Amino acid sequence: MLLKFQVRITGLIIIAIIGVAIAAPYISPYSYDETNFKNILSSPSKTHLMGTDEQGRDLLSRVIFGARVSISVALGTALIALVIGTIYGAVSGYIGGKSDELMMRVVDVFYSLPDLLLIVLITLVIGRGVLGIVLALGLTAWMRVARIVRGSVIQLKAKDFIESAKSLGATPSRILIFHIFPNILSPLIVTITFSVPYAILAESTLSFLGLGISPPETSWGTLASTGWQGMRTFPYLIAFPSLAIFITAFSFNLFGEGLRDMLDPKKRNA
């Protein structure tokens, strides 16, 4: 019961956050780039619930629109990691032998390189827009998915139903698609769920360091980076975007943990 409650509550929070990101143009009280130099750095009030920034822009509106970028980056990263990692891990695990060893050595090489270094190099080539950040994070997050898929495929391909499919003349691609993939959906879903908070925190870190989303686009990371400069005098500038990052990442982590335990037969009745 406790696990189901945890998954339901965090699931509702995640749906609400995604809903805010989708409906940003309709629920935002102001435009995210609307300046008002007569109302610069005003504290939270009834007119501006989260205050305004150094250009008089409404912080609540910028946090709402920032959700669109941060959530888009997170979901895009998870999707790229899912596609690349699943295909790579499945092929490696199913083929086996020396090819499998060689493919896993490639994964080990990528793992040995610092993520930040790879991300910076990729964004320098592709650019610092949303697409560049998504590709950079996705190309550094697929290795974990590949390892999990490979391990699952190695376990499954020795099962009797796989041997039966082979004896009936099923091709490797058919076995992977119709017999193996349906049986590894549970660990895949949980892994991708954990990839989302990783991407949110990574994007926020990059933007905080000035290596992420370029203006005029805004994300929670860029807002936190700007707020850091005036943290002592205007703490609300960093507090609200940081709170949005924390709630989202924490919700996805709890959702992933609850989902993992619910799908684990040993913990299902705990």
Image (spheres, rainbow, N blue to C red):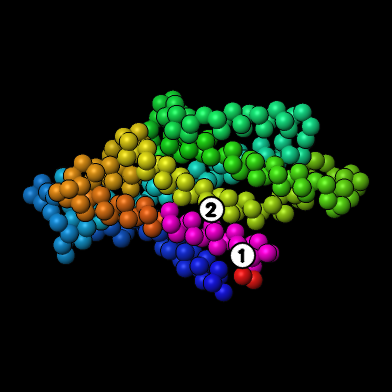
Taking the spot 56% from the left edge, 42% from the top edge, the residue there is 81
Residue under numbered circle 1: 262
Q: Main secondary structure of the magenta part?
A: helix
Q: Residue at x 28, y 42 (%)?
A: 225
Q: Visible in this render: residue 165?
A: no
Q: Position of residue 212 (x, y in %)?
A: 36, 36
Could you say where residue 12 lies in the image, as x and y percent from the top left? 46, 66
* Quadrant of the snapshot with the N terminus: bottom right
* Mark 2, residue position: 193
Q: Work out whether mark 2 precedes mark 1 in sequence or the reverse, and give the earlier one.
A: 2
Q: Please provide percent x and percent y for residue 197.
A: 46, 50
How many discs appear?
2
Task: Work out whether residue 53 or residue 25 is closer to the camera in this orientation and state it.
Answer: 53
Under mark 2, the amino acid is Thr
Quick one: which residue is furthest to the right in this view?
167
Q: Is residue 260 magenta?
A: yes
> In the image shown, does 161 or 256 lie closer to the viewer?
256
Report if residue 244 is visible in the image: yes
Q: Nearer the viewer, residue 34 or 63?
A: 63
Q: Which residues are magenta?
A: 249-268
| Residue plotted at (58% across, 54% down) | 190
Instruction: Please report the residue visible at 20 percent of the width from the left and 52 percent of the height from the top.
Output: 235
Residue 248: x and y, percent? 41, 56
